[in-house]
Image (cartoon, grey):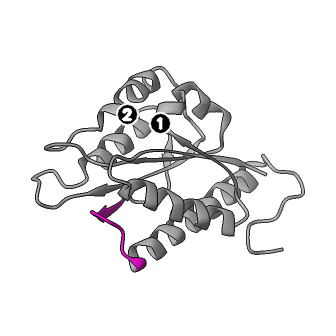
């Protein structure tokens, strides 16, 4: 079964709520998931996973949060070719660069060869019940794309896509 890692940073709890809902969606699709706070993660670990989910709130006028900076710099030397990836984060539309951290992380993953399989998911401030449902669907969709990609490349022997059990 392909392995998925979800790494996030949250200050007020909004991005963590998104991460929790996305993790539920991945698990509903029976995804093999590891969840970590970015402060406990090493960028080099990304190479051990088939799917990469990154979550960050946007700080200030459109920057990555401080807790993500070292991880972001560590990513620079990685080769993520063949890795499925997606990014999410909470944001505040009162700033000119809404959810820019999501865009910054998508750009970095692409630079490193990652296959961005979904548009970045941005949620305004505290996720509502409907936002959390979107997050769960985001997680399910991502997990399915990782498994289907592994099936297409032959990385799974005898496995079936999620939902076809």
Residue extending farthest right: 158
Quarter residue 29 falls in: bottom right
On the image, the x and y values in percent for residue 65 come to 30, 38
Q: Please check the rendered image and state whether residue 122 is part of the magenta-colored stretch, yes or no.
A: yes
**Contact, CB < 8 Å: mark 1 with mark 2?**
yes
The answer for how far apart the CA atoms under marks 1 and 2 are is 6 Å
Q: Earlier in the sequence, mark 1 or mark 2?
A: 1
On the image, the x and y values in percent for residue 146 come to 64, 55
**Local SS, label 2:** helix
Q: Does 122 appear above or below 78?
A: below
Nearest the viewer among 15 and 105 is: 15
* Quadrant in which the C terminus appears: bottom right
Marks counted in the figure total: 2
Residue extending farthest front: 12
Q: Please check the rendered image and state whether residue 85 is part of the magenta-colored stretch, yes or no.
A: no
On the image, the x and y values in percent for residue 148 come to 69, 60
Name the residue that disc number 2 marks: 68
Q: Does 10 appear above or below 68?
A: below
Residue appearing at x 60%, y 40% in the figure: 82
Nearest the viewer among 84 and 8 is: 8
Left or right of 148? Residue 160 is right
**Local SS, label 1:** helix
């Amino acid at each position: 079964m392909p392995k998925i890692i979800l790494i996030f940073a949250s200050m007020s709890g909004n991005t963590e709520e998104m991460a929790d809902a996305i993790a539920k969606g991945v698990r509903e699709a029976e995804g093999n998931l590891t969840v970590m706070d970015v402060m406990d993660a090493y960028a080099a670990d990304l190479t051990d996973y088939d799917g990469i989910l990154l979550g960050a709130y946007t700080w200030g006028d459109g920057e990555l949060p401080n807790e993500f900076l070292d991880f972001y710099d560590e990513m620079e030397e990685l080769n993520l070719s063949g890795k499925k990836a997606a990014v999410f984060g909470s944001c505040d539309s009162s700033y000119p660069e809404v959810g820019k951290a999501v865009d910054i992380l998508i750009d970095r993953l692409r630079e490193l060869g990652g296959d961005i399989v979904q548009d970045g998911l941005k949620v305004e401030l505290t996720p509502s019940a409907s936002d959390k449902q979107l997050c769960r669907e985001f997680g399910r969709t991502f997990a399915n794309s990782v498994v289907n990609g592994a099936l297409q490349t032959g990385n799974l022997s005898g496995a079936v896509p999620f939902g076809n059990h």
